[in-house]
Amino acid sequence: MLKYNLEKRMANWQKNNLMRQRHVMGNRRYGDNRLPIADKDYLNFASYDYLGLIQHPVINNAMINGIKQYGIGSGASAMVAGYFNEHDSIEREFAKWLGFDKAILFNSGYSANLGVMTALLSRDDTVISDKLCHASLLDGIQLSRAKHYRYQHNDVTHLQKIAAKANPDMIVSESVFSMQGDIAPIADLVAVAEKYQAGLVIDDAHGIGLLGCDGRGTSQYQSKLLCVVMSLGKAFNAMGAMVAGNGEIIESILQFSRSYTYSTALPPALCGALRAALKIIQEETWRLQALNENIAFFNAEARARKLPLVSIDKTPIRAIIIGDNQKTVWLQEQLLKQGVYVAAIRTPTVPKNSARLRISLNGLHTKAEMIFLLDKIVEYYL
């Protein structure tokens, strides 16, 4: 029966053009937007390296020095014997940078969202989330067994209607939605949360390093947030995730998060590299400035070509909805033939009939590279 169900599921996946494949990448070079795949270089418009930190020599050296000092792994869970001074330092430095009491380092954004939802919610609680929240948030809420309602994307009026009936304990949203590129109305979410005395949790994966004062994401609202979850695999171009909040909340997450307790801690050498990346993001402010200039340029050029971007918010994620899965994959293949790598996003990552090309900008893209991409999309799409 299991084999039959899997075969049936795979056949349906293939029929609907949902099969995914992994491309084997080659060596990467600092300051280079080329992505080597099968002995050919592709112009990379799919990476999360928004600030161009790939192969940064200072970060690399911090990692190498950390390996010499600590070895490759941590050797245990942070709750046993895997929590080193580098873990403690990056947590303290992150909390200080953002203005929070404390922070805790998880192994990934997915692990962090599962850990936060299951640690802070129970079957006696009610939570309301944006309909387009990341799968990790939805999975975490499901595991918590809390009563769950979803409001229409970025629709504060709909949120208020649900909240008036449900009286939520928690409201959950992303800051920048990873498949849309649009920004949540955080100030309005804060107002609703305060009205109903609900905790507000923000997934700042695509906002940290990019939004707010000096790239500090949604931390300007830190006194109004229950906690903020920040993936370190995007602007920081590393791995792991930081959760920041007041001392009581972070201590509760530390005590009750199973995804934290029962995972081997990240390598201390990686924490040293993260500390170096944090310092670079704070000091090399030209990186964020260059990215914002590229976002403005790309939006203007896309508008001039009448390309229907999902959002023109000031974020590096640019999406064009194609709708049909087969056509979306075909467009990606045509761009690959032209030496450009762009992500083709389909269900279940996005709702049915909203398959799209997702373009990720960074501060190192040149105007010529962006124009080349846009002209090729126009050539095949319009």
Image (cartoon, rainbow, N blue to C red):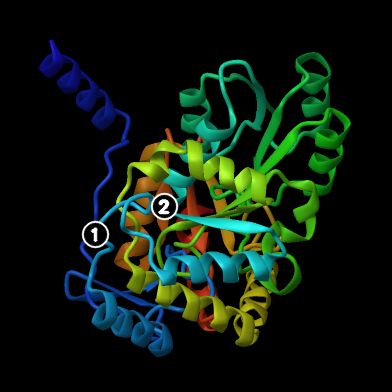
Q: Residue furthest top?
A: 1
The amino acid beneath tag 1 is Gly
Q: Residues within 10 Å of mark 1 (few under 14, many from 20)?
A: some
The numbered mark, 1 or 2, whose residue comes first in the sequence reads 1
Relative to 274, is 252 above or below? above
Q: Disc 1 marks which residue?
A: 75
Q: Which of labels 1 and 2 is toward the front?
A: 1
Indicate the position of residue 325 as horizontal and vertical percent values: 40, 38
- The x and y percentages for residue 42 are 32, 73
Quarter the N terminus occupies: top left
Residue 309 versus residue 83: which sits nearer the camera?
Answer: 83
Work out whether 237 lies above or below 104. Answer: below
Name which quarter of the figure residue 125 lies in. top right
Residue 321 shows in the view: yes
Q: Which residue is mark 2?
A: 108
Q: Residue at x 57, y 46 (%)?
A: 251
Which amino acid lies under the numbered mark 2 shown in the image of this protein? Ser
**Which residue corresponds to the image point at 51% horizontal and 81% vertical from the top-left?**
364
Residue situated in front as seen by the camera: 325 or 203: 203
